[in-house]
Amino acid sequence: MSVLKNIVVLLCIPVCITFLVQSNRPPSINTQPDSIVYYKSGEAVQLPCKAGGFPTPTFSWKRNGIDFNPSGNDDRFTQLPGEGTLVINVPQDKDEGLFQCIATNSFGVSVSTLVQLRMGKLNDFPIGPSITHRTHLGESLVLNCIPPVSVPMADIIWVLRTPEGHIESINLNNRISMDFDGRLHIASVQTQDYQDGKAYVCMANNYFMRQNVYDKNQYINPMGSTPFNRPPQYSWASPSDMIGLKGQELKLKCIFSGNPTPDVIWLKDTVDLSHHYKVSLGGQELTIPSLTEHDAGTYECIGRSTNMPTASRSLNLRVQ
């Protein structure tokens, strides 16, 4: 009989240990929303929330710091059974706010990160008359673009629009380039910039809304027959004092005007760059793939053309 008891005890050990471990496990949220969730008006959106723990956790929500009951009077909100996932079936603009999921059992509480729920939108550009730029060959030109309100932020692209309304791409290079604020820079206007009378147009593209909107037409009418030669001149650059986060990618950019089109070279702390850095668009754009403490320092971009004075700009980078 004692042998049988020993066998029973031995068989019980793994089961009992498992039970003891399970009975003393506070909640741990393992599925939660991104820090920002976008939604379209009228299209259902989910805020996922799942958690482990023993006993099985119960779930609740806070909205803008206040207890929020998804099963209240508003039947547009549903909480999936057995988990905390919140579903808004017909979201409206008033549903924007900060949400947080809370998992609770008798041994503790676990909370999700704060989730910002925002309704996607893309406004139109202001209506305005077309603009014709009459610029002498060899001179520089900047086409302005003020992006419309967009959630999430829209991508800005410059395109050509034909008289029939067709859209064509613009090939960017070191003579024709965009700054990070959406303006189009032409280092030196050439005859081909007339583009057979096509309009230059700033386009805002909201990938989430799957919508594009277009600004007013801008035309370039090159003047003269002989291009002016002009030394490099500073046109635009990244902020002169920047902070980057360790491990993230960072892009620096310098744009210079001039005819012939200037080349751009970069120095870091007065010496040439190592192979760790990537340079593109005729030297205008410098990419640091993954920031480290060693990338902190003073960067200098220099615009130069043969037998002409140079122009330069200094940028200070700190890494945190």
Image (cartoon, rainbow, N blue to C red):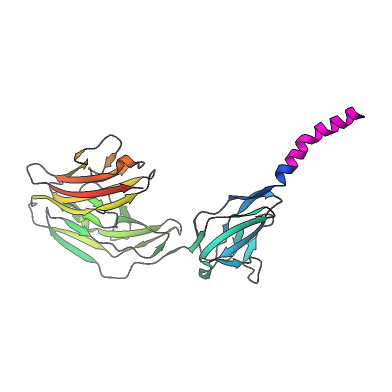
Q: Is residue 318 left or right of residue 185?
A: right
Is residue 277 visible to the viewer in this orientation of the structure? yes
The N terminus appears in which quarter of the rendering?
top right
Residue 187 x %, y %: 17, 51
Query: Which of 30 and 253 lies nearest the eye of the viewer?
Result: 30
For the stretch drawn in magenta, the main secondary structure is: helix
Q: How many marks?
A: 0
Residue 132 x %, y %: 19, 64
Q: Is residue 39 left or right of residue 279?
A: right
Q: Is residue 87 left or right of residue 229?
A: right
Residue drawn at (53%, 67%) of the image: 95
* Residue closest to the far front: 2
Above-or-below relation of 164 to 297: below
The image quadrant of residue 143 is bottom left
* Residue closest to the far bottom: 73
* Residue closest to the far right: 1
Residue 139 x %, y %: 12, 55
Above-or-below relation of 63 to 81: below
Residue 102 x %, y %: 61, 58
Q: Is residue 193 left or right of residue 123?
A: left
Is residue 171 visible to the viewer in this orientation of the structure? no
Residue 85 forms part of the magenta stretch: no
Query: Which of 275 and 136 lies nearest the eye of the viewer?
Result: 275
Q: Which residues are magenta?
A: 2-19
Residue 3 forms part of the magenta stretch: yes
